[in-house]
Image (spheres, coloured by chain):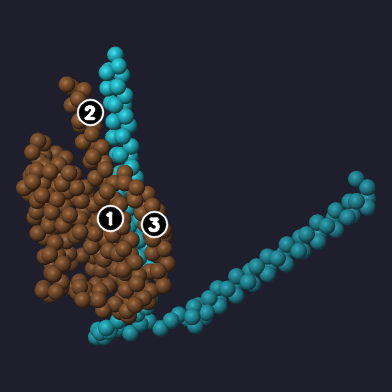
Chain colours: A brown, B cyan
Amino acid sequence: MPKWFMPLAGINAVMFAAAPFIIASANYEATMGLVQKIFYFHMPSASMFLVSAVVCGIASARYLFGGSPRQDRLAYAAAELAVLFGAITLVTGPLWARKAWGVWWAWDVRLTSSLMGWMVAWAYLLVRKYGGPGSDKLAAGLALFGMANVPFVYISVNYWRTIHPKTSVVPTLPADMGMALWFSFASFLVLFVLLLRLRVYLEEERTKLDALYLSLDE
Amino acid sequence: MQPSLRRATRLRQGFGAHASTRRHGALICFLLLLVVSTPLVAQQQQPEPPKQTDEFVPISQLPPQDQLPAAPLLVTAYAFVWLALFGYLVSLARRLSKVQREVERLESDIAKGSRT
């Protein structure tokens, strides 16, 4: 593991310990009240879900057209993180919606496209696990569709009529709410980098293991 | 039995019988009072039946006692985030340590094989 990993993990642990206090000190939203505070973990996890899908897509494209195993390992790691952060987004969102909208779920463009992106990430992992030989290339093709879905998820709230808040709420946040949001965002971003590196390291160790088994056969 | 002791016993029995009769009388009076007064009290305490609804009056906001509390939803959301992240970290650590143990075992096997 690289030298920066453990110090950064320590800093990230402190950031996550401090985040609830910063979130609690932010003002309440006028119409939604207390439940709006879910936003401070929902939005960063949703962003990391989309970042994971983009990283997975780019790495898969580079693997498909360049053939680098390193890019394949990165894509595999990013797909797993897309499932993790997607799950967080799709669980915290309905908990917020239940209070704010009165329903757990709506077949709204943002929600439906996010669910589709999450299912593509799951499909990637399932193909990799059970697809047999050649499944890495097949999964890489799937990851391209996962990445293509990302801009659609992002702009959906601005182009279609939906009950989900628009992307314009973020730049218009008052200072205390903005501070809580960007602090949480930074915490999730650092966590994403750490988890991605750790997951890639696991794939590197598995590659080493495969090489050892091959050398034993020879 | 000594005469004084017999007298004392008779007196105690007599006193007991009088006391028992008085207790029964008081109990009967209390029950009668209860039976007589219950319908009166009930009549006084009974609230007026609600008026029959002949129209629905719309309001834009739910009354506070009918509103869904936000705190359980907020706590569930944050608890899920922590559990999911912690669970993933534990799963990653377990998978990593398993692979690393196997790598070490194979490396030592190969080293032994090359020595012999």
Q: Under tag 3, what secondary structure?
A: helix
| Residue that carries the numbered disc 1 in the rendered image | A192
Q: Nearer the viewer, residue A1 or A87?
A: A1
Q: Which mark is residue A11?
A: 3
Residue A42 spot, x, y in % from top left: 28, 64
Mark 2 packing: few (<14 Cα in 10 Å), some, or many (20+)?
A: some
Q: Amino acid at mark 2?
A: Leu
Left or right of B75 on screen, residue A86: left
Q: Amino acid at mark 3?
A: Ile
Above or below — where is A66 with respect to B47? above
Quick check: do tags 2 and 3 share a chain? yes
- Mark whose residue sits in front, 3 or 1: 3
User: Can see residue A93?
Assistant: yes
Q: Say which chain tag 2 marks.
A: A
Q: Residue at x 93, y 52 (%)?
A: B4
Q: Kindly report the distance in space between the C-alpha atoms of the residues bearing marks 1 and 2.
A: 30 Å
Q: Amino acid at mark 1?
A: Phe
Residue A116 lies in what quarter of the image? bottom left
Q: Are marks 2 and 3 in contact (CB under 8 Å)?
A: no
Q: Residue at x 21, y 36 (%)?
A: A207
Q: Say which chain tag 1 marks.
A: A
Query: Mark 1 vs mark 2: which is more N-terminal?
Result: 1
Residue A56 spot, x, y in % from top left: 16, 52
| Residue that carries the numbered disc 2 in the rendered image | A212
Residue A41 spot, x, y in % from top left: 31, 64
Above or below — where is A14 with respect to B67? above
Q: Kindly report the distance in space between the C-alpha atoms of the residues bearing marks 2 and 3.
A: 36 Å
Q: Under tag 2, what secondary structure?
A: helix
Left or right of A75 on screen, residue B38: right
Residue B102 spot, x, y in % from top left: 29, 30
